[in-house]
Amino acid sequence: MKAEHKGQRKAHVAEEPPPVGGSWKTLYAVVLLNLAMLVVVFYLFTRAFR
Amino acid sequence: MRALDWVVLFAALAGIVVYGLWKGRRTRDLDDFLVADRRMRWHHVALSIMATQASAITFLSTPGQGFTDGMRFVQFYLGLPVAMVVLSVTAVPVYHRLKVYTAYEYLEGRFDLKTRTLAAGLFMLQRGLSTGVSIYAPSLILSVIMGWDIRIVIFLIGGSVTLYTATGGARAVENTNFQQFLIIMGGMFIAFVTIIRLLPADVSFVEAIHVAGKLGRLNVIDFSFDIHNQYNFWSGLVGGCFLALSYFGTDQSQVQRYLTGESVAQSRLGLLFNGLVKVPMQFFILFLGAMVFAFYQFTQPPVFFNPVEVERARAGASGAQFRALETEYEAAGDEKQRAARAYVGALRAGDEAATEAASQNLKSAQEKANGVRAGAVAILKEGTKAKPDDTNYVFLNFVIHYMPAGVVGLVFAAVFFASMSSSASSLNALASATVVDIQRRLVTRRRGERYHFISSKLATLFWGLFAITFAQYAGQLGSLIEAVNRLGSLFYGTILGIFLLGFYFRRVGGTATFMGALAGELAVLYCFYFTDIAYLWFNVVGALVVVTTALVITSLSGKSETKKPPVGASA
């Protein structure tokens, strides 16, 4: 009974949207853009102090 | 260590054990013990994931790498954010919908029992041994630096972790990991601020950065492609992505962390947060090492950072020669300090020609000091098979000699916590695989949940004792330690290939997957023994050979072998 209840709760919340950003695609884009920005910053950092 | 350091260290250790026991006191069933009743919020999931990945060696070795090799190691993590996105899209919904306790349960639904048992067995072999090593390695460094009895350090780390993990399971692990990671990063930040304050009064922070950069320690990004180069942009992005996919997607010690999330959303957020902050965090720890390097351009460093090795060399047959080299190294250090100050002066004056000339002098002084050090290291190598390497000792050696009272205890607590957090996750995962994938599935299927709940606690105790025992004898195993450390990179690609077939290629069945796994493993072993390809690429080779071989076999046989599409497999 407990497991069944938990299953229902999870089925319900599984589709919940992210708390910020509006959609998961936006959050994924933020993570990848953050990576791209870090690479650029690291490159400039390497050049500046070479 | 001073009295305040002992107080900080023991208060932190006792506090975390009590906290773990308290948080795990309500663990009453199998669901609670293995996945914390699937009620964790994203921030607990995120920090637990990060604490699991960052072992004590991460916090000892990474600043050392920044010191000796510069910051290029950060590229190793460039593929991680990509992997976090891929896993959020694919693995997380599948594992949640199937409500699995272990990643390997999925393989039985998708392929067959033998594939599940094989994957769980490989995990237990690799993770069981590596947990022992992850306790042994920091214990060795702490015992060498502090002169402590290594057996006591091993027992302290292993015993306390086993105690709260066996008592509270995943709930205790998640909560202690969260607190431990905050203290680890707090300790590292305070250490960083202290290093900056320890720089000479007439040298600014930016000038110290320039000195480190001029001597090649700020080499963060290298876009040149070289398959033999361990750390460049391409190996980090591609090889690192495959490694992270395998580690976070198929290694139970990580999968279990996000299985505790209360929903797909909470687990995803945990992984994505890791994708956002992991690379900057590694940059920061490497930068810490680069700043220790900058500090030692204005202060005399020891010729070798492992004090036990230095004492052995001084007392050995070439002791007189070693001491002469130490004196010569001090003279070279004085010359280097003068060159560094001259460089800073030229930099401040804004004279480009003088700056260039001073930088050449600084590099020459550095090369001269390196030459003297190489002579000392050659003496250290006499009579030993292993190559002397003090990378892991640089940071703690610096800490005990230069950090103020209290901060030393905090940094030591951070090292203990790093070892404890990764070990706790491993013990929890090993208990899960042992009970869920082996015992309950193959031996005691008719037994009830209470029986398997107790079995999970006993399995945690067993793996804890196994890790402690293995750690006690690890020092006598010589090159086996290195082999254990490489074990993961030899299997991760193949295991990832199996899971990729499961997630993305519905037509491929168990036999084709099994044959693909064999081919993939042979390809990885060939690369390992007969080529000098950088190991990050092993993960790519293994995964691609598994997938390609299985697809070819499926095409040639002309029929799909799939038993049943598991729930959520199409996600």
Image (cartoon, rainbow, N blue to C red):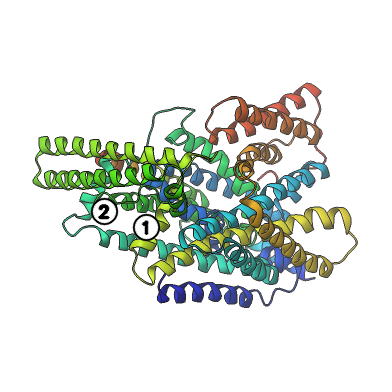
Specify whether residue B282 is in view.
Answer: no
Q: Secondary structure at mark 1?
A: helix
- Taking the image as shown, residue B413 lies to the left or right of residue B101, namely left
The residue depicted at 29 percent of the width and 40 percent of the height is B369
Q: Amino acid at mark 1?
A: Phe
- Relative to B20, residue B140 above or below: above
* Quadrant in which the N terminus of chain B is drawn: bottom left
Q: Nearer the viewer, residue B346 or B236?
A: B346
- Taking the image as shown, residue B162 lies to the left or right of residue B181, namely right
Q: Position of residue B435 (x, y in %)?
A: 79, 58
The residue depicted at 54 percent of the width and 36 percent of the height is B536
Q: Amino acid at mark 2?
A: Thr
The residue depicted at 55 percent of the width and 73 percent of the height is B16
Label 2 neighbourhood size at 10 Å, few (<14), some (14-19), many (20+)?
Answer: some
Q: Quadrant of residue B320?
A: top left
Q: Position of residue B568 (x, y in %)?
A: 70, 48
Mark 2 lies on residue: B299
Mark 1 lies on residue: B398
Q: The disc numbered 2 marks a residue on which chain?
A: B
Sequence-first disc among 2 and 1: 2
Q: Nearer the viewer, residue B388 or B187?
A: B388
Q: Quadrant of residue B366?
A: top left
- Taking the image as shown, residue B269 lies to the left or right of residue A34, namely right
Q: Position of residue B203 (x, y in %)?
A: 18, 54
